Amino acid sequence: MKNDITKLTAYEIGILLEKRKIDPIILLELFLQNYQLAEEDTKKAVSKILKKEAFFEAKLSWERQKKNNRLSIFDGIPSGWKDVIDIKNYPAYGGSKLLKKLRKNIKVKDAYVITNARRSGIIPLFKTSTVEFAFGGLGLNSSQQYPKNQMYKDLRCPGGSSSGSAATVFSNLVPIAVGTDTAGSIRIPSCWHSLVGFKPTYNNISCKGVLPLSKSYDTVGTICKTVRDSAILYNILSKDNLNLFSIKKKCKIGVVTDFNFSYLETKDKLIFENFINELIKHGFNLKNIKVPEFNIANKIIEQEGGIVNYEAWNYWKASIYKGENLIDKNVLSRFHLGKNMNDKVFLDIKYKINILKKKIYNNFDSIDFMILPTISIKAPEIKKITDHKRYIFYNNLVLSSTRVANLFNFPAITMPIKKNYWLSFSVFCKEKKDEILLSVAQEIENVIYD
């Protein structure tokens, strides 16, 4: 039984803790044992082990357990945290040699999300690896060790930028992890690891204490094994106190047919179509829709420049000038795209995106949700993208699939269509409707994994 506990969802483990079938100290030891026994590549998902602090927190959780005074269902659950999030005495390095050099001696407090997690008894165990500056969708980083995709035997991209967070959950090093999502950085690695990745509405979870990339779009979110775990963790981090409810009979879902299908192989198109038909059989109200504004928005970004690039450069340029030679070349090239944009172009792009947003939101007069494939390609082999031009092609390809949720401030959740397979679907809805999004996601999960 003990060997199987680490394969369970966080909620299932929480129930065992609640019933005193296991205590938090033994639980922590089991997850650390998983790490010790893991392959060297898997260990690269972890950039720092907070072992001493974790055992201290586990002992406190055990005392609460004995007194029937647990702080939440996740009290005593070990967790992973993307290394863009400050933890007391452990400043975030953002997967960067340069940032480590600049930040290693500064004193930091717990980020807002860490504080909230501790108040519910969640134990920060690992800092997880990331693309440098959290600036890339494929998960590669020449400035820091990073894991390959854990779902494949061959060397494939883990997805980024929250690569370590997804790899640790998939590999049962922790049951839950936290990342950030600026253009898909939670949803891409979650998709490629057959996990549930949730990007909430912008600013629903505070980014205080999180290294910024783009202050217009940076979002803290979750990587878990189930929707239920995602909802519980989101509640803890955001203090939103959501309650999932039955919504299937009332909701109308638009299947977006003109986006994220172009690169899908025929067999994967068929898998997606069968998934949609299965939802219809189970009483979901679906209809096909087109959202041309998604493709228009991507063309604007590709032709005129990215808001993220501009904001990233203008926030980090003083640091970059202190050590450009220390930065991953692919990341540096993306910073330089922002460097070459002027204020007028930036403001013009933002204006055009806002116009598109108003048009897109008109769709929600007749539907409640949009559903579509998360990404249209499986994780590419790392050896095929060592060339800079090929890296740019694939990086743009995956980000163009996911960035629309950030550009238009949709809360977005990605879920695997079937377990241990890369093809996932995403559900979007209007901003500030996170509760109904998680509710419908829970009902879809109940259908497809029943």
Image (spheres, rainbow, N blue to C red):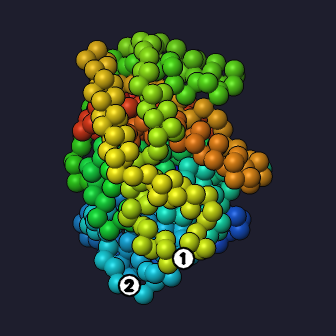
**Relative image position of residue 234 (x, y in whole percent):** 32, 50
Residue toward you, 175 or 433 = 433
Left or right for 116, reference 229? left
Residue 305 appears in the figure:
yes
**Relative image position of residue 255 (x, y in whole percent):** 45, 19
* Mark number displayed over residue 323: 1
Q: Residue furthest bottom?
A: 105
The picture quadrant where one finds residue 72 is bottom left
Residue name at image x 45 percent, y 13 percent: 288
Q: Residues within 10 Å of mark 2 (few under 14, many from 20)?
A: few
On-image quarter of the N terminus: bottom right
Left or right for 34, reference 114? right
* Mark number displayed over residue 170: none
Residue name at image x 69 percent, y 22 percent: 267
* Element type where label 1 sits in the image: loop
**Relative image position of residue 416 (x, y in whole percent):** 54, 36
Instruction: Give the label, 1 or 2, closer to the camera.
Output: 1
**Relative image position of residue 185 (x, y in whole percent):** 49, 50
Q: Earlier in the sequence, mark 1 or mark 2?
A: 2
Q: Amino acid at mark 2?
A: Ile
The picture quadrant where one finds residue 294 is top left
Relative height, residue 368 to residue 16 (above, below): above
Residue at the spot of label 2: 106
Residue name at image x 74 percent, y 52 percent: 387
Do labels 1 and 2 touch, CB within 8 Å? no
